[in-house]
């Protein structure tokens, strides 16, 4: 399953015509890139284009617990399709808040910014709606020498293996939690993540564009077209 990782209205409109997108994810960095500050209008636009798909909106008030809870409730009230993204703070607070929101307010959450199997395990144990593993940021974490570089598939293999282990845990624990993979930097990341067993990959628009591309496909289409034109006498 593919989610679209953007808040750009032009991209949201474009991809609504392909039948590919089952959800939308955003974060403050994506919102800043698109210049979006009005969450309500953003959600309205997404719903008008895609209908009732999950829309992840991240908490922006993270100074204290009460602020985060209030922010989560406000976000959830925008639309029934909103999923509140809660950062997985390394002191465990994010896990605690996500569990509180789900168990006390029935607000679906997406525990995000996780880089290790141990963090993901705790999210699975809490049986949250969604938990997000940041693939290439995890590569950066485990292999600092690759940070800021385009790592090869071989260099990423250990992270793919960790992702597969996370998915095995999800099966063994019989949890309803959906595992999302983000931080996608090339089309192969999408395929490898789904083969590892994740439920969802959230993909930036530029990577979706790249997934269509193959020079041999273009060559083959042209070859077939030329053959037909030669056969029928049409100008090539």
Image (cartoon, rainbow, N blue to C red):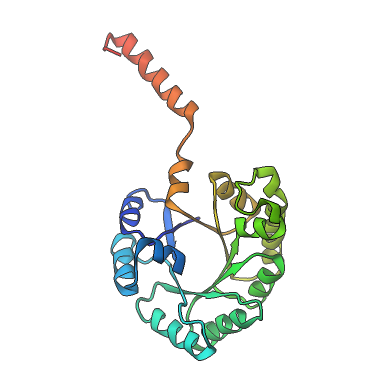
Quarter of the image where one finds residue 133 = bottom right
Q: How many marks?
A: 0
Viewed as shown, does residue 172 lie left or right of 188? right
Viewed as shown, does residue 186 lie left or right of 72? right
Q: Position of residue 29 (x, y in %)?
A: 46, 65
Quarter of the image where one finds residue 142 = bottom right
Of 212 and 53, the residue lying toward us: 212
Residue at x 46%, y 54% (from the top left corner)? 204
Note whether 108 is above or below 3 in the view shown. below
Q: Position of residue 17 (x, y in %)?
A: 32, 50
Whether residue 27 appears in this view of the structure is no
Residue at x 59%, y 61% (from the top left corner)? 134
Whether residue 182 appears in this view of the structure is yes
Q: Position of residue 40 (x, y in %)?
A: 31, 74
Note whether 212 is above or below 42 in the view shown. above
Farthest bottom residue?
66
Residue at x 31%, y 54% (from the top left corner)? 10
Quadrant location of the C terminus?
top left
Quarter of the image where one finds residue 125 = bottom right
Viewed as shown, does residue 221 lie left or right of 197? left
Of 173 and 130, the residue lying toward us: 130
Viewed as shown, does residue 181 lie left or right of 77? right
Of 5 and 195, the residue lying toward us: 5
Q: Position of residue 37 (x, y in %)?
A: 34, 72
């Amino acid at each position: 399953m593919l989610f679209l990782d953007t808040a750009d209205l032009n991209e949201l409109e474009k991809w609504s015509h392909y039948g590919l997108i089952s959800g939308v994810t955003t974060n403050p960095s994506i919102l800043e890139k698109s210049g979006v500050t009005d969450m309500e209008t953003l959600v309205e636009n997404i719903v008008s284009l895609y209908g009732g798909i999950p829309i992840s909106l991240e908490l922006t008030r993270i100074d204290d617990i009460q602020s985060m809870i209030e922010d989560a409730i406000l976000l959830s009230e925008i639309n029934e399709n909103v999923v509140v993204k809660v950062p997985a703070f390394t002191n465990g607070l994010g896990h605690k808040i996500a569990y509180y929101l789900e168990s006390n307010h029935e607000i679906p959450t997406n525990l995000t910014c996780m880089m290790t199997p141990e963090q993901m395990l705790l999210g699975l144990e809490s049986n949250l709606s969604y938990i997000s593993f940041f693939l290439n940021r995890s590569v950066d974490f485990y292999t600092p020498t690759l940070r800021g570089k385009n790592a090869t598939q071989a260099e990423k293999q250990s992270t793919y293996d960790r992702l597969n282990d996370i998915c095995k845990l999800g099966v063994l624990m019989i949890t309803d939690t959906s595992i999302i993979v983000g931080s996608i930097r090339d089309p192969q990341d999408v395929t490898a993540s789904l083969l590892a067993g994740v439920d969802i990959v959230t993909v930036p628009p530029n990577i979706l564009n790249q997934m269509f591309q193959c020079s041999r496909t273009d060559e083959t289409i042209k070859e077939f077209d030329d053959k037909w034109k030669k056969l029928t006498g049409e100008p090539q």
